[in-house]
Image (cartoon, rainbow, N blue to C red):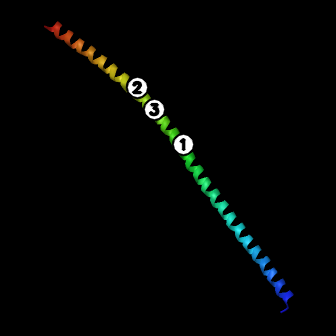
Amino acid sequence: MSPDTTFSLSVLIAIVGCFVGLAGWLHSRDTKISEDAEWRSMVNAKLDMAIGLRKDHNDLEEKHNAITERVGRVEESTKAAHRRIDTLESNMKESSH
């Protein structure tokens, strides 16, 4: 082989090697971008779920507070009713004696 042919063949192999390296780099970049997009969508889905859970928690907390308030009013009403019943019973005992 002549030195010109050897040099041309070496340059050709170097160029092909560059293209193979570039193709590998582009492929790995595309794979990484795809994996990043998949990861980001998964994180977004979890964030949406967490926000939904927080909203549900707030709704349940409001309902709990409303029920707690109602129970307090019912307890007060029950105490008042018992006082009236006790008063009626004592009046009935006094009138029967």
Mark 3 crowd level (few <14, some 14–19, many ≥20, 10 Å Cα): few
Mark 2 lies on residue:
69
* The C terminus sits in image quarter: top left
Query: Which element carries disc 1, helix, strand or loop?
Result: helix
Q: Which residue is mark 3?
A: 63
> Picture quarter containing residue 38?
bottom right
> Is 54 drawn above or below residue 87 in the view shown?
below
Residue drawn at x 43%, y 30% as measured from the top left: 65
Q: Amino acid at mark 1?
A: Gly
Under mark 2, the amino acid is Glu
Marks 3 and 1, Cα distance to the nearest angstrom?
17 Å
Taking 92 as reference, is 75 left or right?
Answer: right
Q: Nearer the viewer, residue 28 or 56?
A: 28
Query: Mark 3 vs mark 1: which is more N-terminal?
Result: 1
Give x and y (percent) for residue 91. 21, 9
Is the residue marked by circle 2 packed among few (<14), some (14-19), or many (20+) residues within 10 Å?
few
